[in-house]
Amino acid sequence: MNARETSIIQDLSLAPEGHLKIDWVKEHMPVLNRIRKRFEQEKPFAGLKVAICLHLEAKTAYLAKVIQAGGAQVTITGSNPLSTQDDICAALVEDNIQVLARYNPEPEEYKQHLIKTLETKPDLIIDDGGDLVTILHEERPDLLPQIRGGAEETTTGILRLKALVKEGRLRFPMMAVNDAYCKYLFDNRYGTGQSVWDGINRTTNLVVAGKTVVVIGYGWCGKGVAMRAKGLGAKVIVTEVDPIKAIEAYMDGFEVMSMDQAAELGDYFVTVTGNKDCIRKSHFEKMKNGAILANAGHFDVEINLRELEGLAQSKRVVRKNIEEYQLAGGKKIYVLAEGRLVNLAAGDGHPAEIMDMTFALQALALEYINNHYQQLEKKVHNVPYELDQQVAAYKLEALGITIDRLSEEQKAYLESWKE
């Protein structure tokens, strides 16, 4: 495959800047570097095609290069039109990875990039939000027989996959990378927590200390967003629909209330639920002048922008990635990054050291699927715990941290019902 001839990107001349970004993250991804060395020797994907749909920035690019080092012919596209970085796309093309993506394409063009990625007839896929899987099952079932299986990155994608399984329609095994311990404990909490506020602060250039932040959803991502907001000096309110998570937020020291109550109090609102219409008309009407709204969920449906536009008398871009909606009476509400993932649409995503662990899991999960796809049921599978432990052990080793090991006697004690 000649990637220069088959890719669809914005500008190949941007490649030098993209290479610098990829080289930078590579220096901070020791776990993935270790896996790459083994892949180069063993070639676990020799002769196979791999399709990747992820946020197309530097860390993702390095994952694609690691998969390529394992012998795969790699095609990659973006999972969000505003998170694709054109210089990264150009650099990958120079490394002979087919890229079908550019920053901020029209919706139909974005959809065509996804379809063309699947038309390469991949054996394995890495998906983000279930877009590739959905197209395969709804629009291009002719491409299903080639697929051995794949790995899913996000909570939203896993929910979609489980819905397919419930209907008895999923046609190949998928690994729930999002549900691996090293994913949700570190990526979802620390990665999302930091990167969301990186994106908000870079975009607004406003202080957080002393402000009231409303975090909608207290899953692992919401926990990270709330924790970082508290660290920045904000007063934090959490809204939830799950009573257990609500109590957890309360015991973590946050105020807990309904969204109807919180709407009047917040200076910043961050949605992290994976559900639609979490902020809607009745909430916009109660918000104070100058409220700032951001989404950290996968799809741009958590803030009901259609209802906000219906209330607005005017709308304008006041700063890059900030849209101002002026309502009757002069009240202004600001939406960041068009309601898309603020940490990627208005930032660089999670820190490299965090994505090192997540993408190491992706690489190992893909290898596991390829080795066992004939024996695995066509459903959503958890990442084997030993892969989680392997990634964690590699990370500790890279950090120079030594931990204890159980003696044989201790192991026997833990496995016995006798004292």
Image (tube, grey):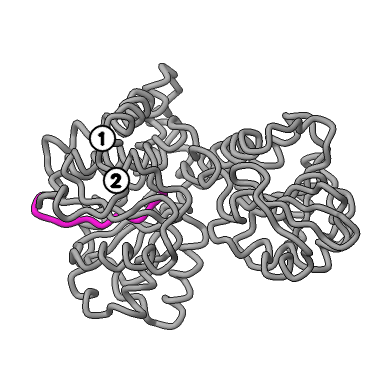
User: What amino acid does circle 2 point to?
Assistant: Leu
Crowdedness near tag 1: few (<14), some (14–19) or many (≥20) residues, C-alpha within 10 Å: some
Q: Position of residue 235 (x, y in %)?
A: 83, 38
Q: Eyeballing the image, is 149 above or below 294?
A: below
SS at mark 2 in the image: helix
What is the residue that sits farthest to the top in this orientation? 400
User: Which badge, 2 or 1, is on the more N-terminal residue?
Assistant: 1
User: What amino acid does circle 1 point to?
Assistant: Ile
Please report the bounds of the magenta region as a residue range.
45-55
Quarter holding the C terminus?
top right
Q: Position of residue 245 (x, y in %)?
A: 72, 54
Q: Is residue 135 left or right of residue 281?
A: left
Q: Position of residue 361 (x, y in %)?
A: 36, 44
Of the numbered discs in the image, which one, if any, rests on residue 24? none
Residue at 36% x, 30% y is 21
Residue at 81% x, 61% y is 284
Q: Nearer the viewer, residue 54 or 404?
A: 54
Quarter of image, res 26: top left
Crowdedness near tag 2: few (<14), some (14–19) or many (≥20) residues, C-alpha within 10 Å: many
Q: Nearer the viewer, residue 116 or 147?
A: 116
Residue 391 visible in the displayed image: yes
Q: Is residue 368 left or right of residue 187?
A: left
- Asked if the residue at tag 1 contacts the one at tag 2, i.e. Cβ–Cβ closer than 8 Å, the answer is yes
Q: Disc 2 versus disc 1: distance between alpha carbons?
A: 8 Å
Q: Which residue is mark 1?
A: 35
Magenta stretch: includes residue 50: yes
Q: Nearer the viewer, residue 416 or 140?
A: 140
Magenta stretch: includes residue 333: no
SS at mark 1 in the image: helix
Q: Eyeballing the image, is 166 above or below 298?
A: below
Q: Position of residue 217 (x, y in %)?
A: 69, 55
Q: Which residue is mark 2?
A: 364
